[in-house]
Image (cartoon, rainbow, N blue to C red):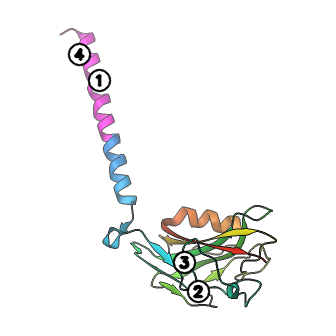
């Protein structure tokens, strides 16, 4: 073999070894980042007040008592250290309207009773650190209740809606969603 062929063979072999190593490393990293679900089921969010894509009762809106509905969840992934919850209306005339942001909910919590505060709150689009129920100006709006399983016990102090979204996204290992509708009559 001449020197040029040996050099090409060596460079090709090193390149192939590096490629196999990188692919293996990516596969290992991906496997270790996937949440380990109990029973292999995705996390699910429910309410006894309404079901998926159904109407939210007046009681939980500006027409009623304006209190949060009961929520419960199951199939929490292993490694969950806390939860965060958001309720948002993407159909608002101003763009997505934030109704409630809650974080640092204990990892052993799997239920939020009606009219309770399960963690720290962030100021919403109503300008308050509290639940603000559906109150659309007109038409039917969708309200997305999103529960996030997080890989940290605490997100620290959060002072804005944008900061909530950023920190929650950085630490989410699983999420569940429940969508309810509301129409102001």
Q: Residue at x 52, y 65 (%)?
A: 171
Q: Which residue is mark 2?
A: 118
Task: Tally the numbered discs.
Answer: 4
Q: Secondary structure at mark 2?
A: loop
Residue 56 % position (x, y): 64, 79
Residue reaching furthest to the left: 1
Nearer to us of marks 2 and 1 is: 2
On screen, 120 above or below 159? below
Which is more toward the observer, 80 or 126?
A: 126
Q: Earlier in the sequence, mark 4 or mark 3?
A: 4
Magenta stretch holds residue 5 = yes
Query: In the rendering, which numbered label is found on residue 12?
Result: 1
Q: Which residue is mark 4?
A: 6
Q: Residue at x 29, y 37 (%)?
A: 20
| Magenta highlight range | 1-21
Residue 92 % position (x, y): 76, 65
What is the distance, in whole Å, between disc 2 and disc 1 at their CAs?
58 Å
Q: Earlier in the sequence, mark 2 or mark 4?
A: 4
For the C terminus, the quadrant is bottom right
- Viewed as shown, does residue 163 lie left or right of 150? right
């Amino acid at each position: 073999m001449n020197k040029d062929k040996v050099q090409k063979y060596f460079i090709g072999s090193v390149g192939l070894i590096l490629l196999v190593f990188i692919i293996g490393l990516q596969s290992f990293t991906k496997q270790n980042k996937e949440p380990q679900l109990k029973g292999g089921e995705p996390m699910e969010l429910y309410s006894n007040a309404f079901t998926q894509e159904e109407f939210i009762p007046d009681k939980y809106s500006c027409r009623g008592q304006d209190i949060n509905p009961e929520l419960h969840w199951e199939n929490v992934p292993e490694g969950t250290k806390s939860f965060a919850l958001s309720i948002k209306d993407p159909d608002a005339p101003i763009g997505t309207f934030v109704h409630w942001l809650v974080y640092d909910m204990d990892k052993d919590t799997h239920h939020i009773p009606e009219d309770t505060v399960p963690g720290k709150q962030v100021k919403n689009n109503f300008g308050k650190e509290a639940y603000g129920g559906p109150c659309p100006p007109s038409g039917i709006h969708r309200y997305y209740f999103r529960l996030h399983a997080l890989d940290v016990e605490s997100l620290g102090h959060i002072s804005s809606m944008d900061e909530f979204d950023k920190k929650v996204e950085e630490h989410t290992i699983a999420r569940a969603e429940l969508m309810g509708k509301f129409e102001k009559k």
